[in-house]
Image (cartoon, rainbow, N blue to C red):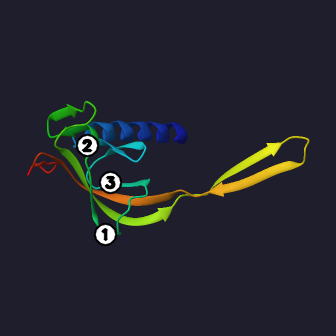
Amino acid sequence: MEFELVCRLKTIYNTLFRIICEFMSYAIIKCGSKQFRVQKGLVIDVEKIIAEPGAQVIIEDVLHLVIEDKQLIGQPLVSGAKVICELLKHKRADKVMIMKLRRRKNSRRRAGHRQHLSVLKIVDIVLEGVSSDGN
């Protein structure tokens, strides 16, 4: 009984969150080799950016943009659109273990890798002077 109630509440919450998010400004950006759906105030981990913590970073690789009631799809990029971010810090991701094993030959190789990341906070989404705040 309680489990069903929790599942229903979670479903209702997720549905309401999706409805609210539809009316917010967001952008799909390309940073490094990955794509991210970002909106104002969101904090994301991206591949390392060469800059000092506290610096302002402008990302101009915007693939898709929804601002106010305008929806723009880039071909491949939206011209005049940019996302203004603040670089919070640099960090390293969790270790990924790589194991190479040749069976029945007593041959094993083990190595690890930690990716360097930058933590970005999205400050604003701008389209040719129009901010996501409507200013």
What amino acid is at disc 2? Tyr
Q: Which residue is mark 2?
A: 26
Between 11 and 81, the residue placed more toward the observer is 81
Residue located beneath label 1 in the image = 54
Mark 1 near mark 3, Cβ–Cβ under 8 Å? no
Residue at 32 percent of width and 38 percent of height: 18
Mark on residue 42?
A: 3
Q: Position of residue 48 (x, y in %)?
A: 43, 58
| Residue 85, numbered label | none
Give the distance between the C-alpha atoms of the residues marked 2 and 1, in whole angstroms: 23 Å
- Quarter of the image where one finds residue 9: top left
Q: CA distance from mark 3 to mark 2?
A: 10 Å
| Disc 2 and disc 1 in contact, CB within 8 angstroms | no
Label 1 element class = loop
Can you say which quadrant of the picture contains the N terminus? top right
| Pair 2/1: label in front | 1
Q: Quadrant of residue 86?
A: bottom left
* SS at mark 2 in the image: strand
